[in-house]
Image (tube, coloured by chain):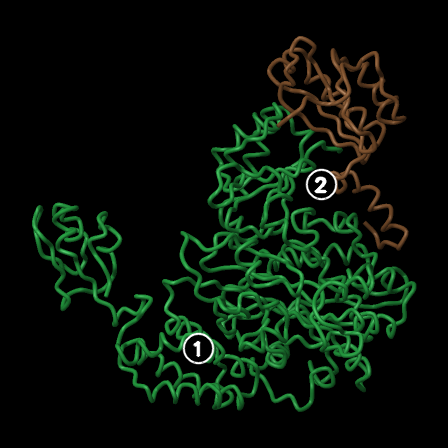
Chain colours: A brown, B green
Amino acid sequence: MAKITIEDLAKIREKTRQATTLRQGAGRAKVNVHMGTCGIAAGAREIMTAVMKEIESRNLHDVIVTNSGCAGLCSQEPMMTVEMANEPAPVKYVYMTPDKVKKIFDSHIQKGQVLKEYALAVGSEKTR
Amino acid sequence: MAYRTYLMVCAGTGCVANQSMKIKEKLESELVRRGLQNEIGVVTTGCNGFCAVGPLMVVQPDGIFYQLLKESDIPRLVEEHFLKGRPVKPLMYTPPKEKAPIPKMSDIPFFADQTLIVLRNRGLINPESIDEYIARGGYTAIAKVLTTMTPEQVISEIKASGLRGRGGGGFPTGIKWETCKNAPGDERYVICNADEGDPGAFMDRSTIESDPHAVLEGMLIGAFAIGSSQGYVYIRNEYPIALERLQIAMKQAREYGLLGKNIFNLGLDFDIRIARGAGAFVCGESTALMASIEGRPGEPRAKYIHTVERGLWDKPTCLNNVETWANVPQIVLNGAKWFSSIGTGDVSVDAWGGSKGTKVFSLSGKVNNTGLIEVPMGITLRKIIYDIGGGLKDGKKFKAVQTGGPSGGFIPESLLDLPVDYEELTKVGSMMGSGGMVVTDEDNCMVDMAKYFLAFTQAESCGKCIPCREGTKRMLDILEKITNGEGTEEDLVLLEELSNMVVESSLCALGGSAPNPVLTTLKYFRSEYEAHVKEKKCPAHSCRKLITYKIDPEICVDKGHGCDVCRKNCPDGAITGETKQVHAIDITRCGKCGICYDVCKFNAIFIE
């Protein structure tokens, strides 16, 4: 790398931002792929790969991807929960396919419109 | 490559010594085995501070904190957490006296009560990557300075911030810069003092290890402000990891043109050389340090002419400590007002009027959570020891805390609500120092502690001036006499007189502060000295010559049935007795090693 200018600082920042924003735990959206035994058996691995592909192709810096265990509704796996920073409650999507992942990114994550036809419910169970 | 999760493995000296690099390799190989290597990235970071529970790792963005990791834990961890999404509770931190582990780093009291300025990037960036430093706002402070500020404006900003020297002296940084800038001379130098010689202090090492570019950027800003084109980092050779990361950082900065000629094409020329210290404590003193860079013996000189006027090679020189330099970029970026809103006192009229910003402390000794902490000035010692430090180990009773390194004073329990502030600490006979903090409990003999630290400073005295060379030696002789049970009441008077003489007449701060442990223990724990002198007893049962091990015959037979374990383990053959019989210690042969005390399961052995 040659000598840099002040403008280059911003470029380097942009380039490295995906890593550093995520490490600080800050994000606009959080996508959680449920990967219990049931989820993995039903194809959660493919869903995770599809999610990663969307993030990379869209060059998203502020979407946190995480996985969790079984959500309890094994019959409707693979499942994926989308949590937007500006929405009050997370949305659970069921019977996921790579194609649905793409649509959810198009609509829910990018435009904030929940895809009701794929969604199971809004919100989570009560916990004590 | 975009990753969804980052495993931030601590690679500070403490964790590396505990095999964190092996953990990292194992993580990488397990991730490959599970096919996760393209989704989950492993990053090595600088010291997280919580050295007591290393090797440790933080999972981001979840913020899950794993501790005390072993290589054998890794396969399960990767499978459970990263493949199946189930964080592994047994590897999380559980506070003392509690049952449930705390998954999130930000919820752990040790981290939650800290305020990070100097260590803001610790655990978040790879210290060997300049890009990651830039991504966290790095080098924008020097860009701001070069494009929008004059040297005078930089100096007035630093002055207004109330930043004071973090190496121990507490001299207002802005005033130092200004005097250096205004001193006559064609050439000036900037020095970073990384010769952290205090036993038990490791904040400068950790700062360089976790964020070396912050130090370089601070020095760049200082160089611009005072008009210097050559800097030095004087670093101990005993800090191999810090040295290596500093060298990597300097190489990267040179490649980006952030060190060298015409930085950012804005006219600033500045480069840095590394000078390695050979491990003499006195070389942390500014004039001795400069003598050492010049190739002369590391001895201080009298400072009737200050180093800001005639320092290195007799040129005006601005020397600041690692932590001070690392504060500078943040002050420039966030403003003096922001910085001075943290801390105590008022610095708007008088630069000495308060302690601003944060201070990094190495917390060690008898606390549960030993490690590196950064706290706002003005926090109480009690909060540091009991909230962040998690209280004393094994439920023992607190006795005293020593602040400021080997020449700091001991502060008793009655003063625990003292705010941490340059003046307040000095008032009670201790000092901020470079930020060592050693906690002692009821088992520590205060006379012995004073002797221990004085033995260190005495050995490190360079010998140039008589009060320090001879005075500390005679003080040590007296302490030796007292702990051997040969002290008299006159010795206490003489010890106090000698201490005050050494403080007043020594050439540099080494002698000027070395008697602090003695003076404060004489002041706050005089009864312990008196017990040694008058009764020939050590109340903490620590001084070997003054204690006797004895066996309670009733407990030995009734409870232990003369188990004979003590006799078998005694290296001196001082214990007589046989199974089912009462045992006894022959004090003429007893070497007072304490092994019998430790091995007796029935507490039949006691100390008098």
Percent position (x, y) of residue B82? Answer: 62, 28
Snapshot quadrant of residue B58:
top right
Which residue is pictured at 83% across the width and 19% down the height?
Answer: A102
Please name the residue that numbered disc 2 is placed on: A23
Q: Is residue B4 left or right of residue B25?
A: right
* Labels 1 and 2 within one chain: no
Classed neighbour count for the residue bearing mark 2: other residues with Cα under 10 Å, few (<14), some (14–19), many (≥20): many
Number of dots carrying numbers: 2
Amino acid beneath label 2: Arg
In this picture, is B555 found above or below B31? below
Percent position (x, y) of residue B372? Answer: 58, 56
Residue located farthest toward the right when viewing the structure as drawn: B148
Image quarter where the C terminus of chain B lies is: bottom left
Percent position (x, y) of residue B588? Answer: 14, 68
- Decide which of B70, B92 is in the foreground and name it: B92
CA distance for labels 1 and 2: 46 Å
| Chain on which label 2 sits | A
| Chain on which label 1 sits | B
Please name the residue that numbered disc 1 is placed on: B459
The circle drawn on residue B156 is: none
Of tags 1 and 2, the one toward the viewer is 2
Q: Is residue B259 left or right of residue B245?
A: right
Q: Please, what secondary structure does the residue beneath circle 2 have?
A: helix
Amino acid beneath label 1: Ala
Percent position (x, y) of residue B154? Answer: 84, 70
